[in-house]
Amino acid sequence: MRVINLGPDPSLAYRPNLERGESKGKEDYRNFESGSLIDRVFNTYKLMHTSQTLDFVKQKHSEWSGCSHARIGVMEAIMSLDQLVDESDPDVDFPNSFHAFQTAEGIRREHPHKDWFQLVGLIHDIGKIMALWGEPQWAVVGDTFPVGCKFQDSIVFRDSTFKDNPDDKNPAYNTEFGIYAPTCGLDNVLMSWGHDEYLYQVMKFNKCSIPEEGLNMIRFHSFYPWHSQGDYMHLCNEKDLEMLPWVQEFNKFDLYTKTTDLPDVETLKPYYQALIDKYCPGILKW
């Protein structure tokens, strides 16, 4: 994990291109073949794809889903991500807290009347706080995928990173359905452990009032093989198919708002604190 020590206004350290910004086309995002960050990204996925087994995921649910690790408010969790640079992300090399506000502001511009959607944009990655509490990044960040069934070809680096994962060779787990029944529903599928599932569990544990559409955005926004590649449809039920367009709508803001033109966080905080107070008030259990 890369930890960055910043001054009282961390945004100042990450605004070298504020005047001119940086423009990227959609084809320039999620480049997993080349770029200055590719070695870091590949190594993170190699560790993830080697170690994320069915047994590992069950262990992490046992460790984290009880929300007994800390008690903090949502804004404090967001700002703690000043200390985190996501080692799986080929698009950015600045603290994850800025990405939170970028995503939220992108949603606010296009969906000004859906305040819960804006809040989801703000908080969707704060499950990455696990990395600040000791979890390695390969168990926190990156694209997610089901365990307990065949690892599909659409998973990033599928051909080169799963050879040492024992589940890939286990006949109980490496078939199309594995341990699952057809159309069982994603609620009944165990995903690789990471910040998506953890934050979903935190929201449910604390009875936060975010609508079901928003909870599914949180839970599956990193499930690119599903929402962007159309894989794993054989496990989906009717509810999943209804939720898929919402996850896809969220994805365009999660992905395409990543630029070096960073937001003025202090100016935005009061607006978003009001949304936190509405949907996820007070001190939460994590």
Image: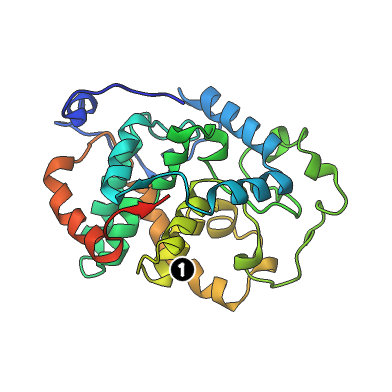
Question: For this rendering, which residue is in front, 76 or 38?
Answer: 76
Question: For this rendering, which residue is in front, 56 or 40?
Answer: 56
Q: Residue at x 52, y 54 (%)?
A: 66
Q: Quadrant of residue 280?
A: bottom left
From the viewer's perspective, is 15 left or right of 34?
Answer: left
Q: Residue at x 33, y 23 (%)?
A: 4
What secondary structure is marked by label 1? helix
Quickly name the residue at label 1.
245
Q: Residue furthest bottom?
A: 238
Q: Position of residue 27 (x, y in %)?
A: 44, 43
Q: Residue furthest left?
A: 267
Q: Residue furthest right?
A: 171
Q: Residue at x 39, y 54 (%)?
A: 252
Say above or below: 52 vs 217: above
The three-letter code of the residue at mark 1 reads Pro
From the viewer's perspective, is 113 left or right of 31?
Answer: left
Q: Quadrant of residue 278?
A: bottom left
Question: For this rendering, which residue is in front, 282 or 171?
Answer: 282
Q: Position of residue 8 (x, y in %)?
A: 16, 27
Q: Residue at x 79, y 43 (%)?
A: 168
Q: Is residue 223 visible?
A: yes
* Pointer 1 local density, CA inside 10 Å: few below 14, some 14–19, many at least 20: some
Q: Position of residue 139 (x, y in %)?
A: 57, 39
